[in-house]
Image: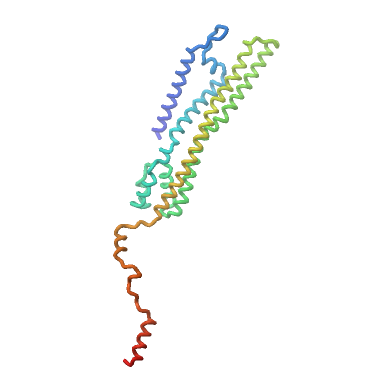
Amino acid sequence: MFKNSLIRTVFLVGLLGVILAVAAVAMRAGVMTKGGHSQTLLEQFVVSGGWIVWFILLPMSVVMVYLAAECSLTIRRRKLLPNGRSREIIEMIQQYGMKQFNSRIEGKNDLVSLAMIKAVNRSGTDTEIVEDAAAELLQEQGMMLFRRIEWLNLIGNVAPMVGLFGTVVGMIELFNAIVSAGGQPQPAQLAHGISVALVTTFWGLLIAIPALAMHGVLRSRIETIISDAAVETELILRKINQPVSSPIKQETLKQKPAIEQLPARPTARIVIQQRNEYSAKGH
């Protein structure tokens, strides 16, 4: 837990450092306007948006980038459904049994291992109950993963609304400037309201598009991984339910004669018939 928190803190600090570095470069890289005034990229795309960009959209963009990066690194098939884990679990159960399974596989964090561990803890060694419990636990883990990426969906839906809110604020400032100028404002007096309207809309779309795209990709990935994990869990339970024939038992079966080769015992009717024939002959 402490290690994960430390990684998240380092990532956020690094991300903020990158943003500040880009802002510093943008402040130096000026863009000359027709009037000869040098306007930086920071002024064009951040400062012109006003407080809505600074205090709402910029923090939202940082959170979106962090969530997208973290979910992309943690929700992976190599981490959640590693190759060869099913075979390892089958061999472990066949060798040590269901009672010692949890102690042997402790520390594994993939979906199949967690589902099997929790299912055995809840249901004991009854394989039919374990199968139902494992399917239920896989569904719970899938819902947990869906809840993690749901923040991306929320940001992707809220960001355009915040941009639209900024557009409305910019239009209000624009009309206030017209009223203040007596109906004949100068273009410079209208520039601030137009900048707020356009820049906030720009940031809202800039945040929403990658957030919704990453949510769709991660959702499809989770559905595929959970489906494959359910198939592997069912395969594990099917394998461990099959009787395991040891070499000693197979050798014993080979030494025993087949039923067809054994001499048939005479039934009671045959014995009585033979005795009557023997008596009829006068013996």
> x%, y% of residue 252?
30, 63
Please name the residue shown 45% across and 31% down the image. Answer: 70
Identify whether 27 is placed above or below 102: above
Please name the residue shown 33% across and 67% down the image. Answer: 258
Question: Going by the image, does 176 lie left or right of 71?
Answer: right
Q: Which residue lies furthest to the bottom in this view?
A: 282
> x%, y% of residue 40?
52, 13
Q: Which residue lies furthest to the top in this view?
A: 36
Question: Going by the image, does 267 lie left or right of 65?
Answer: left
- Circle count: 0
Quadrant of the rendered image containing residue 203: top right
> x%, y% of residue 222?
48, 39
Q: How is the image coloured?
A: rainbow
Quadrant of the rendered image containing residue 84: top left
Residue in front for this viewpoint, 191 or 228 = 228
Q: Residue furthest right?
A: 183
Q: Which quadrant is home to the N terminus?
A: top left
Q: Which quadrant is home to the C terminus?
A: bottom left
Residue in front for this viewpoint, 99 or 116 = 116
> x%, y% of residue 29?
48, 13
Question: Going by the image, does 37 lie left or right of 168?
Answer: left
Please name the residue shown 57% across and 8% down the image. Answer: 34
